[in-house]
Amino acid sequence: MSRAERSGTSALLTARGLRKSFDDREVLRGVDLTLHRGEVVVLIGPSGSGKTTVLRSLNGLEIPDAGTLEIAGAPEADFTVGIDKNERFALRDRSAMVFQHHNLFPHLTVLQNVIEGPWRVQRRPKDEVVAEARALLSRVGLADKEDAYPHELSGGQQQRVGIVRALALKPELLLFDEPTSALDPELVGEVLLVIKELADEGWSMVVVTHELAFAREAADHVLFLDGGVVVEEGPPEQLFTAPRHERTQRFLTRIL
Ligand code: ADP
């Protein structure tokens, strides 16, 4: 199915008016975000603009002070009213996050790291989970590393394991929080390639990144955040080549 066809499908995620303060500082000031099934939405913007807080709000790691969030399969969360523990778990179940630092357990092998969530948390049968984990590791070129420990892998390999660990949870959508910013420059490409392939396979994802070339190539929709608001959004070809807002223009000329 082409991107255009996929984008025509109904919304998988709808966030409206997300607001969040830390101490007395409002870092999200009414953020809207819609993701259709099979779409890649990329968040860009200066450091401190609120990108990570938006992402973390989408899976219950951060609870906004106001706004609503609806992800297919979970009841709408109304943050203005407040959500309970069950609603928070329901949100968290829908997505899997890939962090800037892979956060692998150092004392577990690659395979053990991957099966930990689906086997121990989701309580799925171990045989099934191991078979799926092996297939996923092979899929990202790490079939021969299942018995290795994280410290025996390169940063790029560790991050690919981090991605496999997210996939093994069989989430509705993937959330990437600057997945390559902790890597040496020569290792960035292999991780972006895996993410791009997942996008091409039809995974729904929200990606926070400073890799604008990747954003341009992989995104269906780009949001430019500054000061806790979405200043501008649109398809990458429009946002990168003909940004309408002066703040977007300034950001792009500074970073490119
Ligand atoms: P970005 O991802 O665009 O760099 P963040 O969402 O990480 O931005 O952060 C937005 C602002 O919120 C920053 O000023 C950051 O310091 C602040 N912030 C984020 N998380 C916390 C927290 N847990 N406690 C206090 N301040 C935070």
Image (cartoon, rainbow, N blue to C red):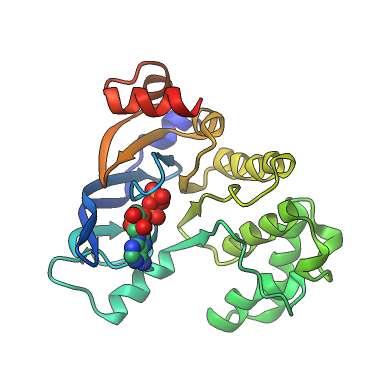
Direction right: furthest residue: 144
Could you tell me how many numbered marks the image carries?
Answer: 0
The quarter of the image that holds ligand 1 is: bottom left
Left or right of 126 on screen, residue 82: left
Front in this rendered view, residue 34 or 214: 214
Q: Position of residue 154 (x, y in %)?
A: 78, 56
Q: In front here: 156 or 218?
A: 156
Q: Is residue 216 visible?
A: yes
- Which sits in the foreground, 7 or 164? 164
Residue 85 x/y as whole percent: 30, 81
Residue at the location (14% across, 66% down)?
A: 80
Please tell me whether residue 208 is drawn above or below residue 7 in the rendered image.
below
Q: At x 53% / y 78%, what residue is drawn?
A: 122
Residue 36: quadrant of the picture: top left
Could you tell whether 34 is left or right of 150 in the image? left
To which quarter of the image does residue 73 belong? bottom left
Going 37% across and 49% down the picture, which residue do you hit? 48
Rendering coords of residue 148 (x, y %): 83, 69
Residue 147: quadrant of the picture: bottom right
